[in-house]
Image (cartoon, coloured by chain):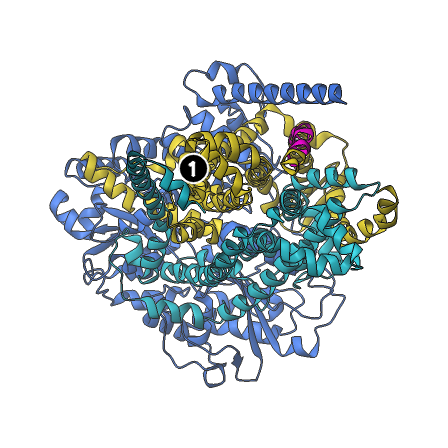
């Protein structure tokens, strides 16, 4: 065993080389230059007058952390918009995945799987547009609303913080629940079917089977879903951008961090402030991933035991 | 396999099963309808003209389908067919590169025992969380200075390093790729590269297919980076062209064309998805876990 | 190791809890339900609106931009570039004018048959040519999200050292001074066009593109005076007449306008559709530019009149709570709408309104001058410094903006109001628009155009007007508790866009 790992180690480095070389060139270098920019005053006036780069130390950071700039609010917005979509997403995906893979139910699932995934193929901006149409003052949702309630004025979905956020969350949910369902199905299908068969013989009901067998065994994929969803959440931009008109509507209650970042780039190319904001976003992302990584590591010993137990069977 | 087990159950069991089945179908159908609503709006509005669309939505299709199609296809500023081609090239090559090299990297971390294995794994997990927008600034400047703007290289090559795909592959290997298979191959005298290419990739097929779809769709719908890199009208991708059609001002604003363009952009993806989804479902059933 | 993890997890939890708490604190302050005391307590904060500070900033005097020095061209245009006329634009309007009314446009070589598409744009081949074989290369970038200006800025910055020269670019009034006082434009006089040739153009169209040294840097073929367009059927029902003179009497100043709005409401109609409909009639009649010479943002007193009016209209249901270009705003112009009128300029009446009105309301609209003179829109042509087709650029400018016969032909052919005073006066003498029920609206335009005052325009108008309207919408809808909160949001948005601007302090 020891001799083997010594002789094959070089293959490890060879196989990971393309990934890390490309990463270094196309991500690491730009990342470092972005961070470097955060220490400078550097923006454009009137499209031609370049101000800076002048070294200003941490001044951009202190400006961004200035209470008046509401950075905390944008992080909270991002979190609310993410979690409001993620909770129903994970709930329904788990439900559907367990139905789809239930040996006793024997549902005809082909069409559902295809349909559930379909919203994901529409680009986020277009999805935002379609929902804007649906919920607009003269859209179909409002005509149903008016005919049910008998009111003669439409409900202004995009001028109330709550409904605006709900629509963004709904879009995110709709775009991703099919994707997650497929992912979880793949994981559940990967579980040894004999486990279910023996559970069935032992008289376990579907709920018990789900919580005792399925859920623990698909934990790695659940974690994957959580992480990718968090990444997506942190990067949320297109959908709220379309729905909220640059995030300004409703007192900026749906402005996400990345939308805020874009505000510094669109007109003045303010590399200093955008750089500082990028550093903060990076730190938050790093902290989140560390947190998740710590949870993975803690679960690792348990996970190692299981295959061993299974092998012994 | 399950049939004999069912036979053991009692009559009342099959009745609750029937009820459960009905509940499932009702709920599933409800969600299917919700998932299809955006498509319904899209399809109807593809057949209508701007003023009809602005007057409010109705389920009755208009008769502007062919006109909208002709507008979208024939306008020289938009070069729809050309951008369709560009999007196909970029999405296909980048999804291929992404799944292959991410699987290779995950395989290296999964199978080989080398000193940097743990730290590198942690490192990839860390960078996975970094939003693309964070480095976008530096990325565009760098591509500018290397004269790579208005080329596809900045949109294709970076997909070799796809942390999210890597992580999925790693997770999949943890559950479905026993090291014994690799060791057995070595005993048979198979080289390391050959083992990966001809023995491991078939086992990974379901995971590769799933990730291929995901990365294809992500790349296909990507607007943020391409919009910063591509400005030549012969190089534009579909989302950029849709953005242009959509942001036209009053003098050439055409909602019908916008919906048509979105519709055109969705069809190829849906086709790719439909082709690959059958393959995935079949592949998953043979999950390598049983090995 | 396990301990380390616990410490790590604990500290992370603390961090998160901390950030959530502070963030929640922020949120309470903003919801404004009674939390005004909280944000007031900060004192001297950077985005706080103060009436006294604003007044003081008004007295400083408008920003006088320094005309930037032109940049020496370090590269000559290549042979290809010399045979290409490269024009930057954001839409198809100018293209169609050039195609139809520039005598040296080669219709055959360009594949132009005279057919138009749904939007009224000529159908042409992929490549377009002038009769001397020069190819016209259009670089079209929509103006949304500042994309057009960003593209223009990047490419103009590279012009001096590039062998692929930009020959001409188009600009709008709201940001014209940014380019007029910038380094990338070639003065009109340098193209050989004399003041005499331009004498028949409306003064305001020249003011928009005159730099801080008094040099004219661009020209326009159109003038875009605005009017108030109203529904004849609603006017008859509520005001008892649809005669433009009598309706004008009912909207002649803002007091009368408001009274009429109340009558409309009583009869079940809305005076205006959006929050922004009347905005331009105010923003064109300010006594201070948006930015003063200290680079401070100045809010003109006129805007407070607009805010009070629009808040009042929103609260009383005098408007339909839409925004410009919303689907509902567009639908309000059709027979399904219940809105009395819209502030629209030349193109808006003859193109946009006509389109939305459809067959149902054809002949059912009329126009009157409204409470205040204003303009909306317009496109100016600038020669790019370093152009290697200067003669062609000059020739296009002459034919499209100085040739009276040609311009009158544009007006007759497209209903576009052109920039020839004598020509328009002649057309105005005898004109009837079928869409407006036979009304001679050109006569109204020709009366309104000389009254337009563009002297308070500044380079920041577009960005600041946009941000200001967006911020005030929150106030009208009750999403921000007070005007001051909404103004604070406006300041914030303005400084994000323009880091060089300052919020006035006492």
Instruction: Please indicate, yes or no, whether residue A17 appears anywhere in the rendered image.
Output: yes
The spot of residue B2 in percent (x, y) is 43, 44
Between A62 and C411, the one lying in front of the other is A62
The spot of residue A58 in percent (x, y) is 74, 30
Q: Choose top left, top right, bottom left or bottom right for residue A233.
A: top right
Residue at the (37%, 35%) spot, across then down: A159
User: In this rendering, is residue A77 above or below B211?
Assistant: above
Q: Would you say the magenta stretch is mainly helix, strand or loop?
A: helix
Image colour for chain A is yellow
Q: Choose top left, top right, bottom left or bottom right for residue B5.
A: top left
Q: Is residue B13 left or right of residue C39?
A: left
Between A103 and A8, the one lying in front of the other is A103
The spot of residue C245 in percent (x, y) is 20, 50
Q: Is residue C191 left or right of residue A189?
A: right
User: In this rendering, is residue B23 above or below B68?
Assistant: above
**Chain appearing in cyan on the rendered image:** B
The spot of residue A304 in percent (x, y) is 68, 33
Between A21 and B174, the one lying in front of the other is B174
User: In this rendering, is residue C157 above or below C489?
Assistant: below
Q: Is residue A251 left or right of residue C216?
A: left
Q: Which residues are magenta?
A: A291-307
Residue at the (40%, 74%) spot, across then down: C122
Residue at the (57%, 36%) spot, across then down: A217
Image colour for chain C is blue
Instruction: Name the residue that disc number 1 marks.
Output: A95
The subunit carrying tag 1 is: A
Instruction: Please indicate, yes or no, whether residue A78 appears anywhere in the rendered image.
Output: no
Between C230 and A298, the one lying in front of the other is A298
Counting labels gives 1
Q: Report crowding for label 1: few under 14, some 14 to 19, many 20 or more residues within 10 A (C-alpha).
A: some
Residue B217 part of the magenta segment: no
């Amino acid at each position: 065993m020891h001799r083997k790992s010594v002789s094959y180690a070089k293959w490890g480095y060879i196989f990971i080389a393309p990934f890390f070389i490309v990463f270094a060139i196309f991500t690491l270098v730009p990342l470092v230059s972005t961070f470097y920019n955060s220490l400078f005053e550097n923006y454009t006036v009137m499209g031609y007058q370049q101000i800076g780069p002048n070294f200003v130390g941490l001044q951009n950071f202190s400006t961004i952390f200035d209470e008046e700039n509401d950075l905390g609010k944008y992080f909270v917005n991002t979190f609310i918009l993410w979690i409001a979509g993620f909770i129903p997403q994970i709930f329904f995906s788990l439900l559907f995945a367990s139905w789809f893979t239930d040996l006793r139910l024997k549902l005809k699932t082909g069409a559902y799987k295809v349909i559930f995934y379909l919203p994901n193929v529409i680009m986020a901006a277009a999805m935002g547009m379609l929902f804007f149409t649906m919920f607009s003052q003269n859209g179909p949702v409002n005509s149903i609303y008016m005919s049910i309630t008998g009111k003669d004025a439409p409900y202004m979905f995009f001028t109330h913080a709550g409904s605006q956020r709900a629509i963004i969350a709904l879009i995110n949910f709709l775009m991703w629940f099919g994707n997650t369902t497929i992912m979880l199905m793949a994981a559940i299908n990967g579980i040894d079917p004999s486990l279910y068969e023996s559970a069935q013989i032992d008289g376990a009901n579907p709920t018990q089977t789900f919580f005792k067998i399925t859920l623990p065994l698909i934990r790695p994929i659940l974690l994957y879903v959580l992480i990718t969803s968090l990444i997506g959440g942190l990067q949320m931009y297109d959908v709220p951008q379309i729905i909220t008109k640059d995030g300004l509507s409703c007192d900026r209650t749906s402005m996400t961090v990345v939308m805020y970042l874009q505000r510094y780039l669109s007109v003045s190319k303010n590399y200093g402030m955008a750089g500082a904001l990028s550093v903060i976003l990076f730190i938050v992302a790093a902290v989140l991933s560390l947190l998740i990584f710590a949870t993975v590591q803690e679960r690792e010993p348990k996970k190692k035991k299981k295959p061993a137990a299974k092998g012994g069977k | 396999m399950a049939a004999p087990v069912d036979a053991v159950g009692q009559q009342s069991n099959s009745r609750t099963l029937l009820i459960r089945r009905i509940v499932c179908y009702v709920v599933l159908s409800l969600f299917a309808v919700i998932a299809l609503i955006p498509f319904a709006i899209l399809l109807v509005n593809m057949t209508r003209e701007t003023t009809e669309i602005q007057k409010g939505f109705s389920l009755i299709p208009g008769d502007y389908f062919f006109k909208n199609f002709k507008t979208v296809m024939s306008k020289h500023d938009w070069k729809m067919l050309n951008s369709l081609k560009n999007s196909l090239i970029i999405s296909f090559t980048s999804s291929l590169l992404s799944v292959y090299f991410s699987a290779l990297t995950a395989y290296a971390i999964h199978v080989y025992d080398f000193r940097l294995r743990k730290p590198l794994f942690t490192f990839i997990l860390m960078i996975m969380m970094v939003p693309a927008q964070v480095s976008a600034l530096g990325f565009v400047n760098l591509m500018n200075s290397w004269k790579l703007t208005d080329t596809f290289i900045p949109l294709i090559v970076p997909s070799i390093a796809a942390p999210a795909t890597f992580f999925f592959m790693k997770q999949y290997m943890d559950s479905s790729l026993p090291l014994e298979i690799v060791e057995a191959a070595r005993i048979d005298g198979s080289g390391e590269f050959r083992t990966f290419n001809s023995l491991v990739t078939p086992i990974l097929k379901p995971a590769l297919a799933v990730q291929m779809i995901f990365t294809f769709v992500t790349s296909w719908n990507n607007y943020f980076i391409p919009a910063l890199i591509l400005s030549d009208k012969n190089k534009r991708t579909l989302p950029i062209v849709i953005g242009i059609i959509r942001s036209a001002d009053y003098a050439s604003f055409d909602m019908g064309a916008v919906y048509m363009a979105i519709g055109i952009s969705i069809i190829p993806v849906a086709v790719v998805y439909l082709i690959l989804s059958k393959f995935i479902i079949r592949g998953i059933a043979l999950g390598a876990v049983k090995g | 190791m396990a301990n380390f993890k616990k410490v790590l997890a604990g500290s992370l939890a603390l961090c998160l809890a901390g950030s959530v708490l502070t963030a929640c604190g922020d949120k309470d302050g903003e919801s404004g339900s009674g939390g005004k005391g909280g944000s007031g307590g900060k004192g001297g904060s950077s985005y706080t609106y103060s009436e006294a500070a604003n007044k003081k900033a008004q007295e400083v005097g408008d920003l006088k931009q320094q005309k930037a020095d032109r940049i020496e061209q370090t590269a000559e245009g290549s042979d290809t570039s010399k045979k290409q006329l490269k024009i930057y634009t954001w839409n198809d309007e100018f293209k169609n004018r050039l195609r139809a009314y520039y005598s040296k446009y080669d219709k055959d070589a360009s594949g132009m048959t005279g057919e138009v598409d749904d939007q009224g744009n000529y159908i042409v081949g992929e490549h377009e040519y002038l009769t001397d074989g020069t190819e016209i290369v259009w670089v079209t970038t929509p103006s949304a999200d500042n994309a057009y200006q960003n593209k223009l800025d990047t490419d103009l910055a590279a012009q001096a050292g590039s062998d692929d020269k930009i020959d001409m670019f188009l600009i709008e009034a709201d940001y014209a001074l940014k380019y007029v006082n910038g380094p990338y434009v070639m003065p009109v006089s340098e193209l050989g066009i004399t003041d005499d040739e331009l004498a028949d153009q409306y003064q305001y169209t020249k003011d928009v593109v005159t730099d801080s040294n008094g040099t004219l840097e661009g020209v326009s073929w159109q003038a875009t005076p605005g009017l108030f367009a109203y529904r004849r059927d609603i006017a008859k029902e509520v005001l008892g007449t649809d005669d433009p003179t009598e309706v004008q009497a009912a909207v002649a100043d803002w007091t009368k306008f408001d009274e009429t709005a109340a009558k409309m409401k009583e009869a079940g109609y809305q005076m205006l559709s959006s929050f922004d409909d009347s905005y331009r009639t105010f923003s064109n009649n300010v006594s201070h530019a948006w930015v003063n010479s200290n680079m401070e943002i100045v809010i003109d007193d006129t805007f407070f009149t607009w805010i009070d009016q629009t808040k009042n209209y929103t609260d009383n249901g005098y408007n339909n709570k839409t925004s410009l270009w919303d689907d509902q705003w567009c639908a309000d112009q059709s027979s399904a709408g219940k809105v009395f009128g819209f502030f629209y300029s030349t193109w808006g009446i003859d193109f946009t309104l006509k389109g939305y009105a459809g067959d149902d309301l054809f002949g059912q609209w009329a126009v009157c001058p409204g409470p205040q003179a204003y303009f909306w829109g317009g496109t100016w042509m600038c020669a790019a410094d370093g152009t290697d087709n200067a003669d062609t650029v000059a020739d296009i400018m002459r034919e499209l903006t100085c040739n009276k016969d040609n311009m009158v032909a544009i007006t007759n052919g497209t209903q576009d109001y052109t920039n020839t005073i004598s020509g328009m006066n002649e057309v105005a003498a005898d004109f009837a628009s079928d869409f407006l029920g036979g009304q001679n609206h050109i006569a109204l335009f020709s009366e309104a155009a000389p009254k337009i005052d563009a002297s308070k325009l500044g380079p920041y108008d577009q960005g600041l007007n946009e941000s200001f309207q967006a911020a005030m919408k929150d106030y009208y809808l009750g999403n921000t508790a007070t005007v001051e909160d909404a103004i604070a949001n406006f300041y914030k948005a303005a400084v994000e866009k323009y880091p060089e601007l300052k919020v006035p302090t006492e």
